């Protein structure tokens, strides 16, 4: 049965998550609770609430390369000279969290970290050569943006290197997308490679390793952030937008708490509604006293920090926690990680075709005084 809707009252809620004294330790600049107790919204019979996001603004105060896309691993082969060694030795090969202007800058950073890991492992001093893309290739230059390089080190004696594997596990972030290689699954064995490392030369006098990615690299991995809410959005999302690690079935569609998708630019994250119908939430409860708003990236992770860092108030918390001299963990509480938005509140009266909006009209004239109209064209009897 068809229904009709009439907006009976509207007003705006202007939200700023900066400043003020937080109502609880859980309230942060990117995880905010709106307390409407003094401005609670009451609904009458046959009414429901529609909340529409009209505007969203936020400074981009986190780095393009961060704790959610900078973590990689390097596995050296088992020690064939010692039968007691049965495991691959793992080394963390993590990029420094910062903005990189060109893909060449990321290639230089990754190759330097690779060199440092191999140098330390075998006590040598290697040199990086044949690095691509080179420094002359800008973001619009003539290049395929595929990272590759050659590591060469002089050796004083033979080393026991027969296997070396580079891995970018999906469970620790999106480095595979940043570098342009295959993602690794958490269940993959240690010798599953994400990119090619070829032992070109391995003699008593020299070691030469050729490293090649498979696909074009990129300077960032987050093109949008997601505004989520504790309200029932009645929306749906694919599982990949909900699971911070590896979704069991990325084609599966599940119920979503996403309210809006906000594009990320170089300095700002801005959304302005053009139709007033892009992002809205219909609320059926009769009284709304509070609801939560919080921001995540495309995989339902806090912006710029690992989901396992539950006490992280600052992007790159993992990196900072390993370097005690770095600033405190207060960016979303005392710092500049916050947002502002405008939410339009519409109270909508809903009715069915046989339901009137007003009470029926009562004729004040007594029936015996009004007569009986038998024929439209004749006066009453």
Image (cartoon, grey):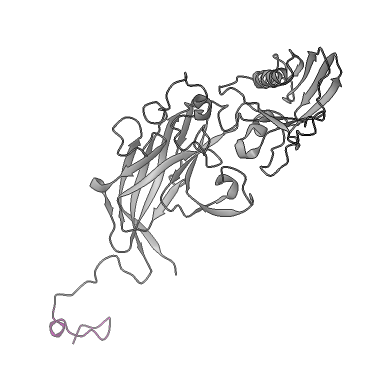
Horizontally, residue 14 falls left or right of residue 140, namely left
Q: Is residue 379 magenta?
A: yes
Find the magenta span and give its range: 365-381
Quadrant location of the C terminus in the rendered image:
bottom left
- Toward which corner of the image does residue 244 lie, by quadrant? top right
In this rendering, is residue 278 above or below 282?
above
Horizontally, residue 363 falls left or right of residue 134, namely left
Q: Please name whichever residue, 241 or 319, is drawn nearer the observer in this view of the structure.
A: 319
- Toward which corner of the image does residue 137 lie, by quadrant? top right
Question: Percent position (x, y) of residue 252?
Answer: 61, 54
Horizontally, residue 231 falls left or right of residue 187, namely left
Quadrant location of the N terminus in the rendered image:
bottom left
Q: Residue at x 33, y 43 (%)?
A: 34
Q: Residue at x 75, y 33 (%)?
A: 85
In this rendering, is residue 266 above or below 186?
above
- Toward which corner of the image does residue 166 lie, by quadrant? top right
Question: Percent position (x, y) of residue 364?
Answer: 14, 75
In this rendering, is residue 88 above or below 148?
below
Q: Please name whichever residue, 292 or 16, is drawn nearer the observer in this view of the structure.
A: 292
Q: Please name whichever residue, 156 or 378, is drawn nearer the observer in this view of the structure.
A: 156
Q: Is residue 183 magenta?
A: no
Q: Residue at x 13, y 77 (%)?
A: 365
Q: Residue at x 44, y 21 (%)?
A: 327
């Amino acid at each position: 049965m068809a229904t009709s809707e009439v907006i009976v009252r509207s007003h705006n809620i202007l939200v700023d998550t900066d400043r003020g004294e937080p109502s609880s330790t859980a309230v942060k600049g990117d995880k905010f609770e709106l307390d409407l107790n003094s401005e609670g919204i009451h609904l009458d019979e046959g009414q429901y609430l529609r909340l529409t996001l009209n505007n969203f603004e936020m400074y981009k105060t986190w780095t393009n390369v961060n704790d959610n896309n900078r973590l990689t691993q390097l596995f050296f082969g088992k020690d064939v000279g010692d039968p007691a060694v049965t495991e691959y030795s793992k080394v963390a090969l993590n990029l420094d969290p910062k903005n990189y202007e060109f893909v060449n800058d990321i290639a230089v950073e990754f190759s330097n970290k690779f060199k440092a890991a191999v140098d330390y492992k075998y006590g040598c001093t290697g040199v990086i050569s044949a690095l691509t893309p080179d420094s002359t290739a800008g973001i619009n230059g003539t290049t395929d943006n595929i990272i590759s390089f050659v590591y060469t080190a002089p050796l004083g004696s033979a080393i026991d290197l027969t296997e070396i594997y580079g891995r970018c596990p999906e469970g620790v972030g999106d480095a595979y997308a940043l570098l342009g290689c295959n993602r690794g699954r958490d269940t993959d064995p240690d010798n599953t490679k994400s990119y090619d490392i070829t032992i070109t030369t391995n003699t008593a006098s020299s070691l030469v390793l050729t490293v090649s990615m498979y696909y074009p690299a990129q300077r960032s991995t987050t093109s949008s952030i997601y505004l989520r809410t504790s309200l029932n959005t009645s929306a749906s999302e694919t599982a990949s937008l909900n699971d911070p690690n590896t979704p069991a079935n990325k084609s599966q569609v599940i119920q979503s708490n996403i309210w809006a998708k906000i594009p990320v630019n170089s300095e700002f994250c801005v959304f302005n509604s053009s139709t007033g119908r892009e992002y809205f939430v219909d609320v059926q409860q009769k009284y709304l006293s509070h609801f939560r708003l919080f921001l995540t990236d495309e995989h339902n992770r806090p912006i710029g920090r690992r989901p396992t860092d539950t006490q992280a108030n600052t992007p790159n918390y993992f990196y900072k926690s390993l370097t005690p001299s770095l600033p405190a963990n207060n960016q979303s509480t005392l710092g500049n990680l916050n947002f502002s938005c405008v939410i339009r509140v519409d109270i909508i009266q809903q009715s069915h075709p046989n339901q009137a909006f007003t009470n029926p009209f009562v004729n004040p004239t007594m029936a015996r005084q009004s007569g009986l109209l038998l024929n439209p064209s004749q006066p009453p009897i």
